[in-house]
Amino acid sequence: MTNLFRAAKVNGKLVAKCIETGAIAPADLIRDIQIKNAFKDNAVLAVDPATGRVTRLAGSIFSDKQKQSSSKMSFMQVVQERDPAVMFSNLERLTKMVGKGIQPSLLVTGGAGLGKTFLVKQTLSDIGLKESHGFVHFKGRATAAGLYLTLFQHSDSVIVLDDCDSVFKDDDAVNILKAALDSYDTRRISYLSSKSLKDEDGNYVPRSFEFRGKIIFISNIPQSGLDDAIKSRSFVADISMNTKQMFQRIEQLLPEMESSIPMSAKQQALEVMKNLHAKFDGVEINLRSFIKASRICAMGFDNPEAMVAEQIIPA
């Protein structure tokens, strides 16, 4: 019988995992470039045990066949029908657990423009943590050395790493995070190199220290693309939403968003976005695109739909 494998990250390394057993394929069974391409394209690798030949199957096709042959319900069916209000309520609760020290880390994923960062920072503020005094927020690229320095300087704080996706692609950074997020009573992080690290003031940083803080990751990378070791040490909150759920989320937030804009203009903006989605492919449906649309509709232009289209449909 043909063996089927999916590409996955384990301890920072890209490997092929057997879909049926979860076992990692031997190093000589599937070439690294085949695994890399399968990971990029979300493809399934089929290995003929008789000949050792490796062929690619579309991941979507395999998923459809798996659904048809399985008597169990796919959890994706549940995910695609979740109420966005419940999703964000759960995210708020998980954030509070990290902020209060019950859990050392939280991994928040989902597309851009969903309000993930706003809710996390607002929740931390609501439980009495002030930015720069209780929690810190970093956004953008991070190296392993920069990560180590950040964890050292804020070793007692909640650290929000927002779109710092480069740390997931660096084996050294992943190993630092694994030490920071371990479930041991004492979490000791080390950075051993021939050249000692210095902080911004030129002071030498210790080669190891005890980390007592917490980390919240916010990323647009899908859960499947993140390191298994980080996921296993963290609470996870996937805020990915389909178009139906995204429109539902906008409707739920309509009274709160853009408070200076009349409700009639916001309702018109939502209707314009729905009309554009029905007519065109690639319409960006998220909170940021809604804010653009509502501001345009509030100005009372004769043809707001055309103007909104220019803003939320990529060229």
Image: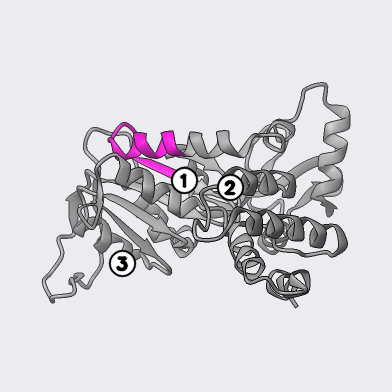
Q: Alpha carbon of mark 3 to alpha carbon of mark 2: how far?
A: 25 Å
The part of the image, by quadrant, that contains residue 266 is bottom right
Q: Which of pointers 1 and 3 lies earlier in the amino acid sequence?
A: 1
Q: Nearer the viewer, mark 1 or mark 3?
A: 1
Q: Which of pointers 3 and 2 lies earlier in the amino acid sequence?
A: 3
Residue type at the position of mark 2: Gln
Q: Alpha carbon of mark 1 to alpha carbon of mark 3: how far?
A: 21 Å
- Are there few (<14), some (14-19), or many (20+) residues within 10 Å of tag 1? many
| Residue drawn at the location 31% of the way across and 42% of the way down | 126
- For label 3, the residue is 145
Helix, strand or loop status at disc 3:
helix
Relative placement, left or right, of 142 versus 78 is left
Residue type at the position of mark 1: Leu
Q: Are marks 2 and 1 in contact (CB under 8 Å)?
A: yes
Q: Nearer the viewer, mark 3 or mark 2?
A: 2
Relative placement, left or right, of 287 versus 313 is left
Q: Nearer the viewer, residue 169 or 256?
A: 256
Q: Nearer the viewer, residue 49 or 129?
A: 129
The numbered disc on residue 223 is 2
Looking at the image, residue 137 lies above or below residue 308: above
Inspect this view and state whether residue 1 appears.
Answer: no
- Find residue 273 and report its horizontal and vertical position in percent: 74, 59
Q: Alpha carbon of mark 2 to alpha carbon of mark 1: how far?
A: 9 Å
Q: Which residues are magenta?
A: 92-106
The numbered disc on residue 107 is 1
Helix, strand or loop status at disc 2:
helix
Residue type at the position of mark 3: Ala
Quarter occupied by the N terminus: top right
- Find residue 245 and report its horizontal and vertical position in percent: 69, 43
- Find residue 211 and report its horizontal and vertical position in percent: 22, 47
Helix, strand or loop status at disc 1:
strand
